Amino acid sequence: MHFLKSINFTSAFILVTLIVVLDFVHGFTEKNVIDSPLLTQKMGTNRTVTVDPNGQEDFKSVQAAVDHVPNGNSEWIIIHITKGVYREKVNIPHNKPYIFMRGDGRGKTSIVWSQSSVHNYDSATFKVEAPHFVVFGISFKNTAPAVITRKMENNKSVAVFVGADKVAFYQCAFFSNQNTLFDYKGRHYYDNCYIQGSIDFIFGRGQAMFHDCELFVIANSRDEIRGSITANYRQRHSESSGFVFVKGKVYGTGDVYLGTAKGAHSRVVFANTYLSRTVIPHGWTNLSYPGSTHNLYHAEYRCHGPGSGSGNRAHWSKQLTDVDAAPFLSVDFIEGQDWLPAWL
């Protein structure tokens, strides 16, 4: 009897071991995260400059370190931003690609500015306009106060503007009261990030995957206007634009739509995501788009949580089958295997 128990135990151990081994995805297990040492190793460079707010390293400001990168740069360079709060606007111009900006953690390294504008681009704290740009462990904040009057209703306060191809953020955080992340154009990857906002706080016509991200909804002070997490501007079926959220969670302090349409072919997918009660039963809105809903692609796949009920969803929204969802569940959606240093 003891012998049989030993055999059963040994068999179970082998089975569990095999499952763990087979659970690896591109060198990681599902429970692992992509960290700073791994990304640094993947860059394969020893070109590093360091920024310190007290002036004890190569540069005192982030923008000064960016300006130091040669125009037309063609090899990876690491800009290490040490712990501290950097109160400045930062722009990565189009002629300075191949930058890996490495913070000490999103709770330690912050780039902060406070500006509202009628133009999203002008208000942004941090602008990325160069391709092949990777960030790890930084918080980006636009601390401009919430817009609460009709007179100022069109003012925006963007934390980050992403207007280049092949851009990736790992373990970063984005803070603003509205219009937080302007995912303007290009292919982008956000892994294990925290994004906070109230009205259309992830918007643009980019082609982006958000993997295991937290989306925190701030209560909208204008009760007559419910906020939306996403506002995708895809205009034609042939456009590759779209926002895909895989895993992660949606929660917060205010009622919110998963998305609002901004174009005739607006495309947003939430897959395997936890949706709290902050997501209203209707789920989706076309309030910002006066045209037909026929070509909108607002979809969910195997989401869970109290806000995931599909019974009262907008009539044009979709609950995807396994086959329908397959193109959105991996980095193939952004052709990530061709350019990402790491993914899960």
Image (spheres, rainbow, N blue to C red):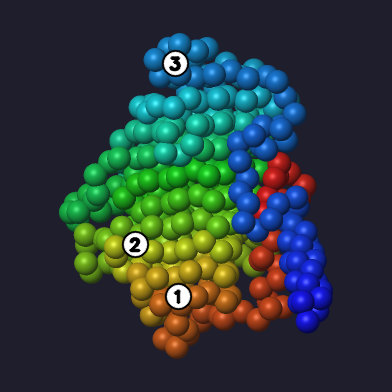
> Residue type at mark 1?
Gly
Which callout, 2 or 3, points at the residue further toward the start of the chain? 3
Is any part of residue 326 visible from this angle?
A: yes
Q: In which quarter of the image is the C terminus?
A: bottom right
Q: As drawn, is 294 to the left or to the right of 17?
A: left
Task: Specify few, some or many for label 1: CA neighbours under 10 Å numbering under 14, 14-19, or 20 or more.
Answer: some
> Residue type at mark 2?
Gly
Question: Disc 3 designates what residue?
Answer: 60
Task: Specify few, some or many for label 3: CA neighbours under 10 Å numbering under 14, 14-19, or 20 or more.
Answer: some
The picture places residue 246, in percent across and down from the top left corner, at: 58, 63
Q: From the viewer's perspective, is residue 130 above or below residue 269?
A: above
Q: As drawn, is 38 to the left or to the right of 161?
A: right
The picture places residue 14, in percent across and down from the top left corner, at: 80, 66
Instruction: Estimate the spatial distance between the alpha carbons at disc 2 and disc 3, rounded to whole Å.
Output: 36 Å
State if disc 1 and disc 3 touch (CB < 8 Å): no
Question: How many numbered circles are shown?
Answer: 3
State if disc 1 and disc 2 touch (CB < 8 Å): no
Which callout, 3 or 1, points at the residue further toward the start of the chain? 3
Q: From the viewer's perspective, is residue 119 above or below residue 300?
A: above
Instruction: Estimate the spatial distance between the alpha carbons at disc 2 and disc 1, rounded to whole Å.
Output: 13 Å
Q: Which mark is residue 305?
A: 1
Element type where label 3 sits in the image? loop
The picture places residue 174, in percent across and down from the top left corner, at: 43, 45
Instruction: Estimate the spatial distance between the alpha carbons at disc 3 and disc 1, rounded to whole Å.
Output: 45 Å
- Res. 141 image quadrant: top left
Question: Disc 2 designates what residue?
Answer: 252
